[in-house]
Amino acid sequence: MPYVVTDGCIKCKYTDCVEVCPVDCFYEGENMLVIHPDECIDCGVCEPECPAEAIVPDTDDRATKWLEMNRDYSGQWPNITRKKDAPADADEFKGVDGKFEKFFSPKAGG
């Protein structure tokens, strides 16, 4: 049961989850993170660390549409292994609906 990042991460991009991941399975886009589902060991330590509550297990109904997106972009974006400062306006985007359609960027971060 891998964990996946949902659109709750978009424009928030807190990296608290990266700091606790024992296998470094997070990848960084311009304005969000994703988890490589084949690298995730299902330990779950990242889920409670996410201030935006954007990480869910793949058994959660919210994960269905994000699993392939996480798989695709984890193959395109660079691996992130250390916590970084969140964007200055991250708190303003916590809990905003429809972030994928409004703000998603396919560009790599770093």
Image: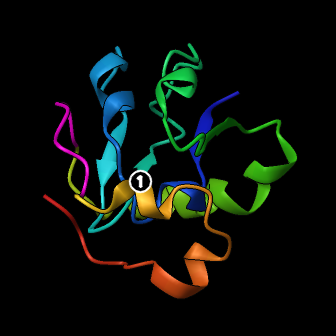
Residue ranking furthest to the bottom: 102
**Residue located beneath label 1 in the image:** 91
Front residue of this view, candidates 69 and 89 = 89
- Identify the element where label 1 is drawn: helix
Quarter of the picture containing the C terminus is: bottom left
47 over 28 or under it: above or below: above
- Residue 42: percent from left, percent from top: 59, 20
Front residue of this view, candidates 48 and 35 = 48
- Residue 34: percent from left, percent from top: 44, 50
The stretch in magenta equals: 80-87
- Residue 43: percent from left, percent from top: 56, 13
Relative to 29, is 91 on the left or the right? right
Q: Is residue 57 visible?
A: yes
Relative to 97, is 4 on the left or the right? left
**Amino acid type for the residue under numbered disc 1:** Asp
Residue ranking furthest to the right: 61
101 over 67 or under it: above or below: below
- Residue 86: percent from left, percent from top: 25, 48
Relative to 34, is 20 on the left or the right? left
